Image (cartoon, helix red, strand yellow):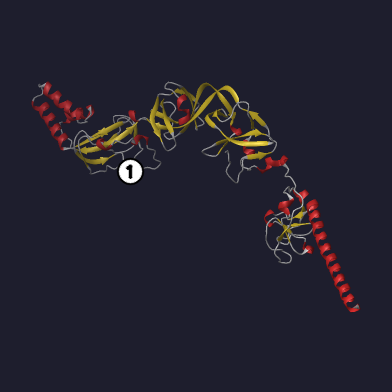
Amino acid sequence: MKKYIKYVIVILLIMIVGAVIYYTIVISKYQKLDNHIKGVYTCPMPQDSFFSDQPGECPKCGMTLVKTEDHGHTESSANMTAYTCPMPEDSVFSDKPGICPKCGMTLVKVEQHETYNQDQSISYLLKPTNNYVIGKYHVTYAMDTSISGEINLPGVVEYDPNAAVNIATRASGRIEKMYINYKFQMVKKGQKLFDLYSPELLTEQQNYIFLITNDPENFSVINASKQKLLLYGITEVQIKQLTKSKIVNPLITIYSPESGIVVGTEFMDKASGNTMLQKNTTTESLTVKEGNYIKKGEVIFRLLNRDKIWGIFNVVQSNGSFIQVNQPIFVTTEMVDIKPFAAKINHIETRFDPGDKTNGVRVYLNNSQMKLPIGLRLEGRVKISPIKGIWIKKQSMVSTGDQHIVFVKNGNGFKAKDIETGIELEGYIQVLGGISIKDQIVQNAQYLMDSESFIKSK
């Protein structure tokens, strides 16, 4: 009987010791949970999802653990202590299932005892950074006013093709000698161009000599023969020499009727392109050479007049409505010795250039005194009348290419908003829609632009 009593006492002691151990483990676990809720330590790297109730180092990345209060964590305890290690001495907590980084055991779900409400006072911090920017910046307002100013028009000096002179052959023949061999040579009026051997001219000279020798009193026929020689390109001086010597010259020298610059040897039926306006920085040889046979009517030289030029200015599409014919324009050049001068717009080209999206504005210039070189860059300034509208400063807007963004004051930060814009004038942008004059916008939008990603306005 005493033996059975001893067995019962031993069993009771074992049960009491087991209950004490179990109670100690449970109480320790909940105490650590309470300590974790009151002051939990976590890894600064959010992707590690590691929490602890005591300071130390993260077993995943090795970084020093920080308190959630100091680190700005505001998650609920339900998320922070959802899973824990079965071994209480490890003190490992996680917001998602996984493996304990200390002992390798599978994390188990923990029963939650308390519920904490999320702090709603900082909900604005959770908005996308590209859509909403937090900070204190200088603000301004859109202005409902009238703004006047000037439009700058880039330009260049070009030849006036209407002042060009085509030198064509009036008789067929062979070129025996060329006095002009390269393009862009300067030619003066009366200068020799080339010597021509022409059977037609030779025959007409013989007829003229026969008339003045055998029928000198037949003035009407002699004058008709003389006019024919003039129409073939023979000068009065050459006819006088022919009358005096009465010797036929098989070679006839062709002289330049005007002064200008040689630009080519185009044929009349092929001169459809505006070759006068083509800039060339190299010296090119002419296509017509000595010994070439040429036909009647063929263009041998084309001379450009340097005294009559054009100023071609480009106008962007948005400013086209402000440009009118006979409107004054103030022109400046890159040349130091040429003072700025006033002119007027003579022609607005109707053809739109799809490359740079501009229209050409033509200004006729007299170059006899200024001597502006062809290809010289110009800058034209045109004054425009005041324009009524809503305007903001250019630095208050950020352009992303297809969008124009301003940052409008909204609560504790600024919200990116897409606006519709008009013209740009004197450092101001015309606003056609998107904001009103009551909206507060950032004074300098460049400070709020995210340089690593696109701005979201919607």
- Is residue 364 or residue 137 the one in the foreground? 137
The answer to which quarter of the image holds residue 207 is: top left
Apparent side of residue 251 relative to residue 105 in the rendered image (left or right): left
Which residue: 60% across, 44% down?
451
Quadrant position of residue 286: top left
| Residue 15 coordinates in the image, percent (x, y) | 84, 69
Does residue 401 appear to the left or right of 137 in the view shown?
left
Is 397 rendered above or below residue 97? Answer: above
Q: Quadrant of residue 188 in the image?
A: top left
Q: Is residue 136 left or right of residue 422?
A: right
* Image side of residue 291 versus residue 427, left or right: left
Which secondary structure, mark 1? loop
In the displayed structure, 237 sits above or below 251; it is above
In the image, 31 versus 216, the foreground residue is 31
Any part of residue 187 in sight? no
Amino acid type, callout 1: Ser
- The image shows residue 337 at horizontal and vertical percentages of 50, 30
Q: Residue furthest front?
A: 1
Q: Residue at x 42, y 21 (%)?
A: 326
Q: Quadrant of the N terminus?
A: bottom right
Q: Horizontal and vertical percent for residue 369? A: 43, 26
Q: Where the C terminus falls, by quadrant?
A: top right
* Residue 3 visible in the picture: yes
From the viewer's side, name the closer residue of 394 and 99.
99
Other residues around mark 1 within 10 Å, as few (<14) / some (14–19) / many (≥20): few
Relative depth, front residue between 279 and 200: 279
| Residue occupied by mark 1 | 285
